[in-house]
Amino acid sequence: MSLFMKAWEQAGGPAIQIPTGRRDGLVSTASNVRFPVDEMIKLFSSKGLSLNDLVTLSGAHTIGTAHCSAFSEGKLTLIDRSLDRSYADELMKQCPAGSSPFVTVTHDPETSFTFDNKYYRNLLDHRGLFQSDSVLLNDYRTRKRVEDFANDQVCFFESWGQSFLKLTSIEVKTGDEGEIRRCCSGRNM
């Protein structure tokens, strides 16, 4: 089992048996996703993932951190205007204009080291860090699933296991394609 999966379980996430030794691509880009739900659905669908997978896999934002630049435009302007005002004010304090590009905030301020369904409860309270999170609450096709997961962690965990397994099977590299990384955060040198 990978170190990532062990850490996941230690954070309270469900145990998922996934194939190991898969090869990673050589190109990785981190860009802020500011799409409407229609574009996210189209992107997920192009990879063989469903609307349910979109809402489920977004739940990964229950743990981890994000650089301030991922959700602000650098001049104390938050990209997402639908945020709870006190939450938005707190984010702007943590990420003032001109702050270092290395400044980060937690995705989930209350349980940032626990894999749980708090992410979905945060969305219901308009405390989704990314605009791509907030749109899940605001779209009639995804809102019900957000509500289901906010109210039932077991339901979220069961769906997570299925969706994550599907995700690990997308565009699997073989032969000389990609590499098996010694450290998951970057290419082998």
Image: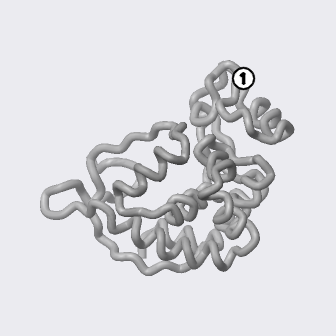
Query: Residue 34's x, y, as percent?
Result: 54, 37
Query: Which of the colour schemes (rainbow, by chain, secondary structure, one colour) is used?
Result: one colour
Q: Is residue 154 visible?
A: yes
Seen in the picture, residue 117 relative to 126 is either above or below; the reply is below
Q: How many labels does the image show?
A: 1
- Give me the residue at 60% from left, 60% from top: 59
Residue 113 in which image quadrant? bottom right
Q: Is residue 23 left or right of residue 72?
A: left
State the residue lying farthest toward the right: 86
Seen in the picture, residue 31 relative to 59 is either above or below; the reply is above
Tell me which amino acid carries mark 1: Leu
- Give me the residue at 60% from left, 73% from top: 13
Which residue is identified by label 1? Answer: 76
Q: In this view, does 156 lie to the left or right of 21?
A: right
Q: Is residue 106 visible?
A: no
Query: Residue 188's x, y, as percent?
Result: 28, 50
- Give me the residue at 28% from left, 52% from top: 25
State the residue lying farthest toward the front: 140
Helix, strand or loop status at disc 1? loop
Residue 177 in which image quadrant? bottom left
Query: Residue 161's x, y, as percent?
Result: 51, 75
Seen in the picture, residue 21 relative to 127 is either above or below; the reply is below
- Give me the residue at 73% from left, 62% from top: 118
Residue 172 in which image quadrant? bottom left
Q: How many C-alpha atoms fall within 10 Å of the one at disc 1: few (<14), some, or many (≥20)?
A: some
Query: Residue 61's x, y, as percent?
Result: 61, 55
State the residue lying farthest toward the left: 176
Quarter of the picture containing the N terminus is bottom left
The front one of 91 and 6 is 91
